[in-house]
Image (spheres, helix red, strand yellow):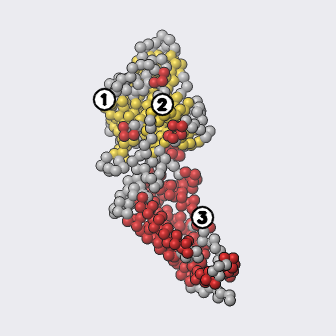
Amino acid sequence: MVAAEADTRVVPASGDLIRVDTDLLRVDIDTLGGSLVYAELLQHKNTHDRDKNLVLLGSEHHYGLQSGLIGANLPNQTTKYSSSVKQASLASGADSVEVRLEAISPEGVKVAKIIGFRRNSYLVDVRYEIENGSSVPVTARAYFQLVRDGKAPADDNSMAPTYTGAAVFTEQEKFQKVPFSDIEKNKISYTKEPETGWVAIIQHHFVVALLPPEKGVREIQTRKLAENLYAISMIFPPIAIAPGATAAVSVPAYIGPQEQSRLKQAASGLDLVVDYGWLTVIAAPLFWVLEWFFNWTGNWGIAIILLTVLIKAIFYPLSAASYKSMAKMKLVAPRLAKFREMYPNDRTKQNQSMMELYKTEKINPLGGCLPILVQIPVFISLYWVLLAAVELRHAPFYGWITDLAAIDPWYVLPALMMGSMIIQTRLNPTPPDPVQAKVMQIMPFAFGIMFFFFPAGLVLYWLVNNILSILQQWQISRMIEGTKPAAPKR
């Protein structure tokens, strides 16, 4: 670790824990180093036990926030601090609460580490106040670091995997992921000494970030500390403190959910930890609309349905063109089969006859595919929005669906989803190739099984989208079938 590398002092086995309660957080501060070793989110429940709160920092993932000072005999994360309090809480009507830890070097340098909490905030202020009571100048460098093992969180889904690892944001290179695997291999690609920016460790729906507020060069380090244990640190420039003088350094930390409104207020670019991938430019507006529907209806499930209807309405002309093409293809399918019977061993003649028929009936063989391809980026973006939004975590819909971010406990939605895919397949034209036709019959079952492992919110979106598609396709097919195709040429 940063300070311990240059320090030969004996490290105590453990310190005392100071419990701090606010309206959003329950935190344990270890007097050994003044590290934050435990953080419980009071407004978010455990993934598997809704009677317990979610623990973000703690021993389960060897996850903590450490800090210290680099300099001769200055306190670091191995120093035993003293404190006059054993427990603190945010008083009724108060806006903040602080815990003060103190240490003094043999030379007389007094260091106070003050950890402050605010009402209705996941920001934790970590501040050092240094008083040089010695007779010689003192130079100190502050460092702050996040330490975590590489285990995925409890809600990680192998069918819909999410990112767990470090991240760096700088004005020069913006947001960059730094996977634990890259740290282990020492594959460093970020700016090591930016003038602005922050570092974080991200997991599905939650983030812990160090957010220095001021401009100024800071060094970023990533290291493997032990087997499956990693650290990302920020080290700040040296501070020269004359005898009798004082100095201070402060770095806030965000410890909480990836709620976009809070992230945007906390630091520039912090909302980018909500992982929409390369389609962020589409996904971000989609979430804004989804949130607007939620604020209007008060139910995230209804908001998903309304957003799906809106997207379907916007793409109605493209979908209609696709379904018209597929309906015409279905109508002429018997005649295409006839060509295969007429020319069983002449592929060229078959294709010529098919092309002539398409021309006569004004059918574009690709007409059913191209409009759908245009919509795919929007569908993928919405998939990532629903997967990444912490707002959907433990958000109920109706009845048995009490968590839109979890798998449907009774698998009703996935079963309906599979049924809708089967109906769609039957509405589509049968492919002329027998092998393709068999593949199309199997696909609803093959793809449908995946939906049994997807979060209920995602399945709800796809189910509603399929139902609307079936209704639209059925209506267009009826209209097309009402017109007779031209008679085949003999």
State the residue position of label 1: 86
> Hey, what amino acid is under mark 2?
Phe
State the residue position of label 3: 373
Mark 1 neighbour class, 10 Å CA radius: few under 14, some 14 to 19, many 20 or more: few
- Please indicate, yes or no, whether residue 4 appears anywhere in the rendered image: yes
Total count of labels: 3
Quadrant position of the C terminus in the picture: bottom right
> Hey, what amino acid is under mark 3?
Leu
Disc on the earlier residue, 1 or 3: 1
Residue 91, horizontal then vertical, whole percent: 33, 36
Q: Element under label 1?
A: loop
> Hey, what amino acid is under mark 1?
Lys
Residue sticking out furthest to the front: 345
Q: Which of 311/383 is in front?
A: 383
Asked which quadrant contains residue 320, the reply is: bottom right
* Residue at 41% across, 19% down: 9
Is 358 above or below relative to 214?
below
Q: Which of 456/423 is in front?
A: 423
Inter-mark Cα distance, 1 to 3: 61 Å
Residue 246, horizontal then vertical, whole percent: 48, 19
The mark found on residue 475 in the picture is none
Residue 152, horizontal then vertical, whole percent: 43, 45
Disc on the earlier residue, 2 or 1: 1
Inter-mark Cα distance, 2 to 3: 47 Å
Disc on the earlier residue, 2 or 3: 2
State the residue position of label 2: 144
Contact flag, marks 1 and 3 (Cβ < 8 Å): no
